[in-house]
């Protein structure tokens, strides 16, 4: 999870990979007072929207870099590890996110998980 903007609104930037990460996500969703967590991404994302988001991902990298000092200062006071989460998100954005989004794009287009024989579309 990452906390964003002045009010540190939280959002999930990567799906959990381990049982521990899944448990942390469940606990965060359970503690969210405004019911901001939803398992409804498939109703909001389309292949076109996903490709557009990917095309504009540089804006996210710029945002993460611009907030680094603020998050480090906040962490010094509150210890929420926001700066570490932002670094992790930036690394994910520059790394394996593309392959994960190609799988999700396949899901959006075909409504099934790809097999080894399936070709994944380009972003």
Image (cartoon, rainbow, N blue to C red):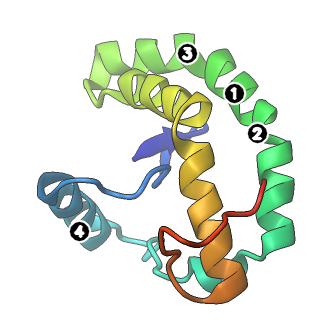
Q: Residue at x 67, y 80 (%)?
A: 108
Which residue is the site of mark 3? 68
Considering the numbered disc 4 on the image, is that residue within a helix, a strand or a loop?
helix
Per the model, the C-alpha gap separating discs 4 and 3 is: 27 Å
Residue 119 location (% of width, % of height): 66, 66
**CB atoms of marks 2 and 1 within 8 Å:** yes
Mark 2, Cα crowd under 10 Å, few <14 / some 14-19 / many 20+, is some
Dot placed on the residue nearer the N-terminal end, 1 or 3: 1
Considering the numbered disc 3 on the image, is that residue within a helix, a strand or a loop?
helix
Considering the numbered disc 1 on the image, is that residue within a helix, a strand or a loop?
helix
Which residue is the site of mark 2? 57
Residue 62 location (% of width, % of height): 74, 23
Per the model, the C-alpha gap separating discs 2 and 1 is: 7 Å
Q: Residue 26, which numbered label?
A: 4
**CB atoms of marks 2 and 4 within 8 Å:** no
Nearer-the-camera pick, 3 or 113:
113
Location of residue 109 (image quadrant)? bottom right
Which residue is the site of mark 1? 61
Q: Is residue 5 left or right of residue 21?
A: right
Task: Relative to 73, say whether 46 is above or below.
Answer: below
Per the model, the C-alpha gap separating discs 2 and 3 is: 17 Å
């Amino acid at each position: 999870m990452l906390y964003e903007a002045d009010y540190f609104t939280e959002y999930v930037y990567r799906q959990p990979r381990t049982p521990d990460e899944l448990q942390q996500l469940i606990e965060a969703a359970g503690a969210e007072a405004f019911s901001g967590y939803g398992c409804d991404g498939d109703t909001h994302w389309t292949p076109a929207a996903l490709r557009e988001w990917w095309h504009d991902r540089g804006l996210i990298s710029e945002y993460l870099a611009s907030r680094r000092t603020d998050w480090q200062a906040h962490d010094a006071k509150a210890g929420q590890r926001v700066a570490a989460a932002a670094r992790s998100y930036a690394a994910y954005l520059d790394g394996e996110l593309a392959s994960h989004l190609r799988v999700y794009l396949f899901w959006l287009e075909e409504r099934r998980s790809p097999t080894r024989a399936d070709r994944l579309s380009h972003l």
